[in-house]
Image (cartoon, rainbow, N blue to C red):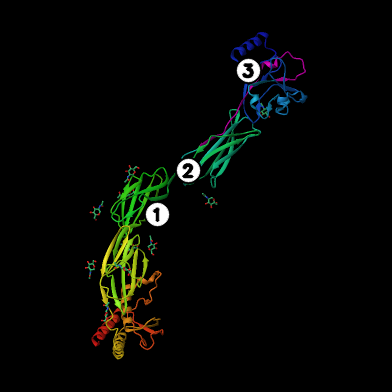
Amino acid sequence: MSCFSMGTVYLLRLLHLFTGISVLQQTRSWKIVLPSTVTAVEGTCVVVRCQTEPYSRVTWYQYHDIYYPVVYDGVYPSTVEHQFRGRTKLLGEPAEGNCTLRIDDMRPTDNNIKVYVWVNPGTKTNQKFYQQTVTILVERKAPSITILKQIVAGEIFQVKCSIKYSCPFSPPSLHWSIRPALENSTSIAFIEEEQGQWLYTATMEGLGTYKMHNTTIRCSAQFKIFTAESQQITLSVLYKPVTVTLILKEELVTEGGSIIMECAANCNPQAHMYSWLRRQMGHIKKINSTQNNMSFSNITRNTSLSCIAHNAIGVGQSKWLDLDVQYAPVILPEPSCYVAGEILRCICQAEASPNASISWTIDGNNTLPSSFESRYINKKNVVSGEIGGPAKSQTNVSCTAWNSRGRDTKYLSIRNLSKTSHLPMWLSASAFMLLGIGLLFGCAIFICRKHSTNRPQSSLNNVQQEQRYSSLQRSQYEDRQLSPHRLENNPDNDGLSCIYDNDFVENPQRPTRAHECKNNATALQMEGNNQLLAQVQ
Ligand SMILES: *[C@@H]1O[C@H](CO)[C@@H](O)[C@H](O)[C@H]1NC(C)=O
Ligand SMILES: *[C@@H]1O[C@H](CO)[C@@H](O)[C@H](O)[C@H]1NC(C)=O
Ligand SMILES: *[C@@H]1O[C@H](CO)[C@@H](O)[C@H](O)[C@H]1NC(C)=O
Ligand SMILES: *[C@@H]1O[C@H](CO)[C@@H](O)[C@H](O)[C@H]1NC(C)=O
Ligand SMILES: *[C@@H]1O[C@H](CO)[C@@H](O)[C@H](O)[C@H]1NC(C)=O
Ligand SMILES: *[C@@H]1O[C@H](CO)[C@@H](O)[C@H](O)[C@H]1NC(C)=O
Ligand SMILES: *[C@@H]1O[C@H](CO)[C@@H](O)[C@H](O)[C@H]1NC(C)=O
Ligand SMILES: *[C@@H]1O[C@H](CO)[C@@H](O)[C@H](O)[C@H]1NC(C)=O
Ligand SMILES: *[C@@H]1O[C@H](CO)[C@@H](O)[C@H](O)[C@H]1NC(C)=O
Ligand SMILES: *[C@@H]1O[C@H](CO)[C@@H](O)[C@H](O)[C@H]1NC(C)=O
Ligand SMILES: *[C@@H]1O[C@H](CO)[C@@H](O)[C@H](O)[C@H]1NC(C)=O
């Protein structure tokens, strides 16, 4: 280089003055290659690359108009400016002419400083080292977060977080913050150099779930002295309808009325079609609609509804909703009253929803005499009512079933079963013999089963009474709730078809054996005997 003439040097200087390029600056004795600017990321270190000819010692200075603040001095470290003390280090090998400088912990106050290198300070030179400076810019960088593609439930998703930094020696660490936490996600990281800076990237991946929808995610880069956060992203996950719920808009569903149902589906995107299912007596009818509400008319009892929501990802069906349909009471066929001995009994059953209440009117009086007892049994919308009391000269009994939807009244005919109640003893005995013969005959034909039954009371009337009772009310006593007034004569013999007592006359209080034939034909036989008895009387 010394062969350059003064004129050439002058020309070069002039050129630099005009172009501002100082990368290849020619000095009289040392050729120094320096970048004109270096961008540092706050919180990390910065490396100022420097190349010259083999040297014995270098010092670095901050450019200043008046004095010479020392940035690096390997021989007299105490001369280093307080601002840089302990933060600067020479990386290059002197023998290789490598004068590269590293400054740690870049901070905002370092922004825009200019530094220059002095090669072999202390030796005589005319070189104006301060004329070739490096401007250091300090930037604060935040990590950037990106979602690689639309997240779909059931598919692998990837979220990337990257941060640029200026120092290869102390990369920041990257952290994810996700609320709520993601299950089973993994994170991998890699570093790449990009135009003198480094890019640190962490990629999180896992299986997308619908629960991730609407969760927020951000990442942060932790530097030595501060943490920089990325922007927050709200995840949007595509998923098929996961929960589908039918909502009944009405408080009351009445038979024959109409209702509006709403189908609420948890899915993304919104459902574009709904299939409405109406199940009635086992038959299912399907209607497609784009609306999430649907009106159903002519509602009948035992109707169930369901809806299926369709979106771009899949379908989901709601549970079946069994409608609680309200209807007015209907008194079931054959309410009846009968007189047995001194007792009048009446039975009335009504189906209704809500459960019906039953009231009685005896000869125009709707207040039951205090000598009467009553009980009511509810069984799946069927209410059974029964009253009993002393038989007088009642002629007209009616039963009324009512609920909030309406009422139903039926008049009950009274049958007198007491025709044999005052039979003389001998007649009763012969009647019993006839009955016994008839029964034996009947049971010989059909299969008879024996079992013990406790009988509270015994008379022929009672036999007849219980037959009647059981055939009328067979199923009613399966689920009984007694009213405070317990009925004394309480037939417990479910499924009785025919009965006779061995010793009912002699000892009415003793538990007796009853033979039961579980066959209706035997019952008919019994009926025949009763008629026979009536004739005897
Ligand atoms: C100078 O030293 C630095 C730090 O050791 C190194 O990264 C760089 O490559 C060296 N420069 C040359 C030209 O070898
Ligand atoms: C997460 O991993 C555990 C164990 O490997 C597994 O039981 C669970 O189902 C996984 N959860 C998800 C959402 O994949
Ligand atoms: C998402 O979250 C926001 C706020 O937490 C809430 O207002 C919005 O309803 C949510 N959206 C869904 C689809 O869950
Ligand atoms: C309703 O939509 C489903 C699904 O697209 C289709 O299979 C069905 O045939 C449609 N039914 C009617 C009645 O349109
Ligand atoms: C369903 O909802 C839409 C808008 O919410 C309304 O315009 C429409 O009348 C509703 N349909 C029924 C049957 O209620
Ligand atoms: C309701 O049922 C009645 C009798 O079954 C029928 O005439 C009527 O058309 C039905 N109405 C609707 C809207 O289905
Ligand atoms: C309603 O359904 C029940 C069984 O689910 C059945 O026992 C009953 O007879 C049905 N009632 C009517 C009126 O169909
Ligand atoms: C109805 O019967 C009740 C109870 O036996 C009795 O107190 C009342 O006076 C009777 N009312 C009429 C109008 O007969
Ligand atoms: C109707 O009776 C049934 C059977 O006893 C009972 O389970 C149900 O709770 C009753 N309903 C009302 C509204 O009282
Ligand atoms: C019972 O009374 C009702 C009205 O109170 C009357 O219409 C009916 O004819 C009466 N029945 C008998 C058998 O007296
Ligand atoms: C039932 O019949 C018996 C015998 O015939 C008779 O004494 C009694 O008064 C009758 N009772 C009624 C309530 O009719």
- Amino acid type assigned to the residue bearing label 3 in the image: Ser
Which residue is disc 3 drawn over? 22
Quadrant position of residue 396: bottom left
Residues under labels 3 and 1: Cα distance?
78 Å
The magenta stretch spans which residues?
Answer: 117-146
Which residue is disc 1 drawn over? 319
Q: Residue at x 53, y 44 (%)?
A: 180
443 relative to 181, above or below? below
Q: Are marks 1 and 2 in contact (CB under 8 Å)?
A: no
State the SS at label 1: loop
Quarter of the picture holding the C terminus = bottom left
Which residue is disc 2 drawn over? 213
Magenta run includes residue 297 = no
**First in residue order: circle 1 vs circle 2:** 2
Q: Which mark is residue 512?
A: none
- Amino acid type assigned to the residue bearing label 2 in the image: His
Q: Is residue 300 left or right of residue 220?
A: left
Regarding residue 209, the answer to whether it shows in the image is: no
Residues under labels 1 and 2: Cα distance?
24 Å
Quadrant position of residue 14: top right
Question: How far from the left and from the top, in percent, is residue 429?
Answer: 31, 90
419 relative to 265, above or below? below
Regarding residue 206, the answer to whether it shows in the image is: yes
Quarter of the picture holding the N terminus = top right
Is the C-beta of the residue carrying label 2 under 8 Å from the nearest atom of ligand 3?
A: yes
- Label 1, residues with CA under 10 Å away: few <14, some 14-19, many ≥20: some
